[in-house]
Amino acid sequence: MQGKYSNYDTDLFTPIFAAFKSVDTSYRIVADHIRTLTVALSDVESRKIRAEVMCCVASFGEYPFRVESWEPAGHFASLVPVVIEILGETFQK
């Protein structure tokens, strides 16, 4: 078994796990950036942040949609209602 203790550590499975890892990382990027933007845009003080910073966060958050050929453009923004539903009680603005 290629000197491994588990067949999951062999070259039969490691490429599959590597693919999952990149998808998992992409999902985490999207989730974190859509949450950050939604909260920042709902907070009056955060709105004072320069537009370039917000654009950078949005661009990086939308990156998996472009690179991984995920959903069509604009799908990133469609996640805002999900964040509002989750955090609406906490941030009631």
Image (cartoon, rainbow, N blue to C red):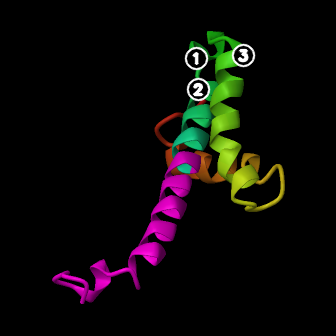
Secondary structure mostly seen in magenta is: helix
Question: In this orientation, which residue lies closer to the viewer: 93 or 86?
Answer: 86
The question of residue 26 being in magenta is answered with yes
Which contiguous range is marked in magenta? 1-30
> Where 25 falls versus 20 (above or below)?
above
**Farthest-out residue, left:** 5
Which residue in the structure is indicated by mark 3?
51
* Residue 31 percent coordinates (x, y): 54, 49
Please identify the quarter of the rendering in which residue 5 is found: bottom left
Between label 3 and label 2, give the one nearer the viewer. Answer: 3
Q: Secondary structure at mark 1?
A: helix
Q: CA distance from mark 3 to mark 1?
A: 11 Å
Question: In this orientation, which residue lies closer to the viewer: 25 or 17?
Answer: 17
- Residue contact between numbered discs 2 and 1, judged by CB atoms under 8 Å: yes
What residue lies at 72% left-to-right and 49% top-to-bottom? Answer: 76
> What number of labels is visible?
3
* Residue 53 percent coordinates (x, y): 64, 19
The question of residue 44 being in magenta is answered with no
Which residue in the structure is indicated by mark 2?
40
